[in-house]
């Protein structure tokens, strides 16, 4: 049965180029359908046969039989994708199985948490997009970049796409949803003073977010966890600041000048207060032991205390 297949069994089905061609053909056919369609119309056997380079109908029938139930669903009018088929064919079409192309170093402004340098350099390091400090040579921040993302953009456009992708995905993490597989995220808050961090990094608490299903991990200052929540995004939007369009290396300045801070205000159960400041306005975000928002407060001027 399909439910009893192992990952090795499922990927072995793709060792035949004809089957990969079938998946491509179904995906292309779906993309050519009218945008007014409420869903995807199944592709019939004859339509698939016209779109693939397979010698005879018997061979096509065999390959469709192998793919059905795993990557394709056989319905009354033909074939359409299963969830696994939808995911794998998008990966194939984007050619994200290839290495990202090399790109030239990109100069960008931000803040190095280690030495305070504001003129930084960004570039690819294998599958990671890294922002580094040319003064102290420390990595300032890094995030996974897809080959398709790097092929489609360069320079400022690549930087902008990285900011948006990281912000969108990290916002999902704050809702307990894994951006990779939609599994459940578990969060742990750690005291930075008890960790081995290089230099005098202005971070008091940070979080480790881990997906229980696919094991994808994220980490960052607790202040960033609070900043990428709807109340914080709205707070800064009111002052013309787009948090979702700001790179982490650009946000580091909020830590170094003390505008963002975090402290533990209770131990049993644990509770944390993050303060995000803009001029004389402050947003206080209160978090529980799992870094989930329990309440927020907006204060101004003399109400800070």
Image: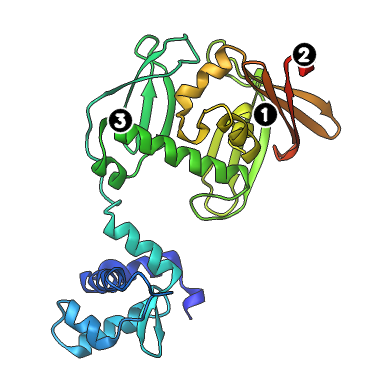
Q: Residue at x 34, y 39 (%)?
A: 127
In primary-sequence order, the first of circles 3 and 2 is 3
Find disc 2 in the rendering and name its residue: 302
Where residue 139 sits, quadrant-wise, is top left
Seen in the picture, residue 230 relative to 52 is either above or below; the reply is above
Question: Which mark is in front, 1 or 3?
Answer: 3
User: Is disc 1 surrounded by few (<14), some (14 to 19) or many (20+) residues within 10 Å?
Assistant: some
Question: Which mark is in front, 3 or 2?
Answer: 2
Q: In this view, does 252 lie to the left or right of 42?
A: right
Q: What element carries label 2?
A: helix
Q: Which residue is drawn at 50% across and 15% down?
A: 113
> Closest to the observer: 77 or 126?
77
User: Split into 4 quadrants, where in the image is the C terminus?
Assistant: top right
Residue 156 tag number: 3
Q: Is mark 3 on a helix, strand or loop?
A: helix
Residue 190 tag number: 1
> Marks 3 and 1: in contact by CB < 8 Å?
no
User: Is disc 2 surrounded by few (<14), some (14 to 19) or many (20+) residues within 10 Å?
Assistant: few
| Inter-mark Cα distance, 1 to 2 | 32 Å
x, y percent for residue 4? 50, 75
User: Is disc 3 surrounded by few (<14), some (14 to 19) or many (20+) residues within 10 Å?
Assistant: few
């Amino acid at each position: 049965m399909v439910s009893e297949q192992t990952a090795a069994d499922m990927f072995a089905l793709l060792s035949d180029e004809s089957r990969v061609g079938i998946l491509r053909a179904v995906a292309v056919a779906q993309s050519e359908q009218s945008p007014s369609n409420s869903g995807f119309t199944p592709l019939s056997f004859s339509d698939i046969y016209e779109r693939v380079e397979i010698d005879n109908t018997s061979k096509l029938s065999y390959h469709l039989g192998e793919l059905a139930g795993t990557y394709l669903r056989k319905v009354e009018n033909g074939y359409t994708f299963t969830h696994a088929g939808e995911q794998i064919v998008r990966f194939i079409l984007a050619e994200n199985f290839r290495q990202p192309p090399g790109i030239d170093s990109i100069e960008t402004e931000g803040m190095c948490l280690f030495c305070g340098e504001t003129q930084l350099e960004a570039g690819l390091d294998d599958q990671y997009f890294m922002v580094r400090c040319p003064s102290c040579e420390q990595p300032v921040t890094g995030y996974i970049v897809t080959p398709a993302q790097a092929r489609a953009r360069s320079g400022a456009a690549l930087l902008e796409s990285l900011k948006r992708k990281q912000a969108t995905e990290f916002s999902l993490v704050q809702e307990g949803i894994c951006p990779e597989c939609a599994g459940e995220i578990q969060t742990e808050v750690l005291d930075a003073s008890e960790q081995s961090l290089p230099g005098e990094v202005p971070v008091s608490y940070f979080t480790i977010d881990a997906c229980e299903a696919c094991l994808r991990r994220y980490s960052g200052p607790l202040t960033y966890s609070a900043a990428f929540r709807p109340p914080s995004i709205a707070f800064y939007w009111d002052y013309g600041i787009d948090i979702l369009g700001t790179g982490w290396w650009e946000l580091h300045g909020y830590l170094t000048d003390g505008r963002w801070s975090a402290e533990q205000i209770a131990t049993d159960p644990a509770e944390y207060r993050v303060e995000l400041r803009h001029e004389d306005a402050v947003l206080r975000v209160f978090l529980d032991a799992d870094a989930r928002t329990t309440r927020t407060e907006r204060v101004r001027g003399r109400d800070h205390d």
